[in-house]
Image: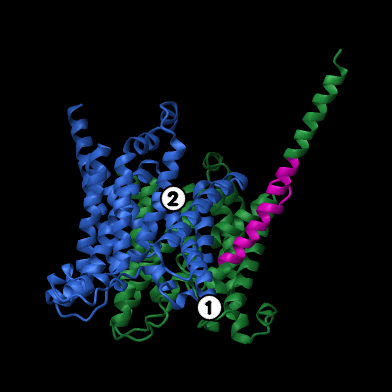
Chain colours: A blue, B green
Amino acid sequence: MTLAEFLQLDLGPLLLVVLAGVACALPGNFLLLKRASLVGDTIAHAVLPGIVVAFILTGTTAPAPIMIGAVVAALCATLLVNLIAHTARLEQGASMALVFTSFFSLGVVLLEVSGARAVHIDTEHALMGAVENALWLSATGLTSFVDGAALASFPTSVLRVAAVAMLAAVIVSLLFKELKVTAFDPAFASVAGLRPHLADGVLLVLAAVAAVAAFDAVGAILTIALFVCPPATARLLTDRLERQVPISAAIAATTGVVGYAMAALLPRLFGFDLAVNAGGMVALVSSIFLLIVAWKARRRAASAGRLAKRDG
Amino acid sequence: MLDALVFQAGYTASVVSLGVIGLGCAGGILGTFILLRGRALAADAVAHASLPGFAIAFLVAALLGMQGKSLLVLGTGAVVATVIALATLQRLEATPHLRPDAAIGVVLAASYALGIVVLSIVQTLPVGGQAGLTSYLLGSTAGMLAREAWTNLGVASAIAVVVLVLYKEFAALTFDIRHARLIGLPVALLDGLLLAMLLVLAIAALQSVGAILFVALIVIPAAAARLWVTRLSSMVLLAAVIGAVGCHVGVALSATVARLPTGPAIVLTLATIFALSLLLAPRRGLIARMGAARRSAAGLRAALAAGQRTRP
């Protein structure tokens, strides 16, 4: 494998999964704290019709309309979950299952019926991501990074995800106090004048935008892995939110690299002609990370319990 | 479309439609108890968890030169995978600092990721009979055989019979678990039976509804029925009818519109029925509620006005 080959075939997809992981992990920490991780799953499914409708209306995959469509769809889905849970007297989980399957189905049907699937997005993309779209075919070597003509064809999906990851980092650091207090204790946040509804709204929009970023990397259904696994792993490693957030971002980036390497590079290095789905592998690696850390945490808790029993 | 709806689209198409209608009936009946027991998300987890078992069983069977698509092979794999996933879920929920929502999110993500990775490997291997394995994600009745449809019908009838025979026991379980325990019912066994039937139905419905949308078949008919009726027996009956209608119309739709997967067509039909119920149902529907609110407000105003007039 030469450098040019790496730049052409692997750099774009690799950056895509790493940046999407970071973009999802940042809001994922607060969803985890609010015990609303499955809201992340609902949002990830619900953005599909938003993306498709925006595409049908504008005819392009330009980032702005797609993001707006996704955010509107996510807001509608969240409001509907609450309305249905209240009116039909369903538990939150059942109401979520009802809403996300309906939204996702609507997205698939719109894709198939409108003919949008012929261009850029199709159902397979929604099901398992499309990292292979992020190729940088005009790259020839490191000089391509300063070559305007080559840079012009740098995959736009990577730039979009990079922008989303930066946005998430900026918002989370600016509103850290508000998000933290609202997640821990909404009543106190309201008394302290921190406007919990605003913080909740910001979190929702951030999650929806991150879900669009993850859509290219791993597809709609695997996005839940990026929302839950790195933050939950970080939660098991530290008790301080100030540390948990950066640790989760680091874990997301690491699992992105490891997962992509296992999917794309390893089979090629060993000469196997296998095409392993990269998004799936990234999600799998981050789940395995979490399972190992959780297993250790359980063992630690168990041995601490035994010690306490012996000493007590 | 009309041909398919009145069973005039040929023998196989009619039998396939009948089989899926059976699954819809069983989904409504079983879903009523699952919903009332508060286990909607378990249905989602079970359906996702069966996917990697399915894929791995197919891979192993194909490598051993067996007929990979035989229901016995795939079913065994799915059962093993689901049991492993549920055991993992239980362990994760018992891990300190991990909430149930995060645990279920991780299990959903890990199962689906493993399923996607194995499916992508299967597709690059030179083994036969792999065509359309991805249709197990969203369902496709297009290539379904009459034999498979009869199996579906058998599974659905078996589930309906078990639920009806143990009707009183399940009713006690879902309404008042302490009472059920007190009168000596084997509560854990009944819960296990409910879960086992859920798994069997999920495997049977994988081909028509798909792993991602299966939860809708469980939740939506029961949730819609609940808006109209209050008695458990009427809810079971109505949910079965709604499930059957949703599946029938969905299959006919996907047979008429080219490339439309069956799962989303069924889910959208069910969602439409639910939306109508949410609006129109007497007493619990939104319109009835608004009318009741307006009447009580008018009554209050009239009473106030009358009070003012009679005041000395």
Q: Which mark is residue B34?
A: none
| Residue sitting nearer the eye, B46 or A251 | A251
- Residue lying at 49% horizontally and 61% vertically, measured from the top left: A50
Residue B236 in sight in this render:
no
| Residue sitting nearer the eye, B15 or B256 | B256
Disc 2 versus disc 1: nearer the observer: 2
| Image quadrant in which the C terminus of chain B is located | top right
Give the class, few, some or many, for how many residues have Cα within 10 Å of label 1's Cα (few <14, many ≥20). Answer: many
Residues at marks 2 and 1, common chain? no
- Residue lying at 60% horizontally and 61% vertically, measured from the top left: B271
In percent of width and height, residue B126 lies at: 29, 86
- Residue lying at 51% horizontally and 75% vertically, measured from the top left: A112
Give the class, few, some or many, for how many residues have Cα within 10 Å of label 2's Cα (few <14, many ≥20). Answer: many
Q: Secondary structure at mark 1?
A: loop
Q: Is residue B14 magenta?
A: no
Q: Chain of mark 2?
A: A
Q: Is residue B290 magenta?
A: yes
Is residue B276 toward the left or the right of residue B63 in the image? right
Give the residues drawn in magenta, as a range.
Answer: B267-292
Is residue B41 toward the left or the right of residue B64 in the image? right
Q: Secondary structure at mark 2?
A: helix
Is residue A260 toward the left or the right of residue B259 in the image? left
- The residue under label 2 is A39
In percent of width and height, residue A198 lies at: 44, 39
- The residue under label 1 is B141
Total marks in image: 2
Amino acid type for the residue under numbered disc 1: Thr
Residue A104 in sight in this render:
yes
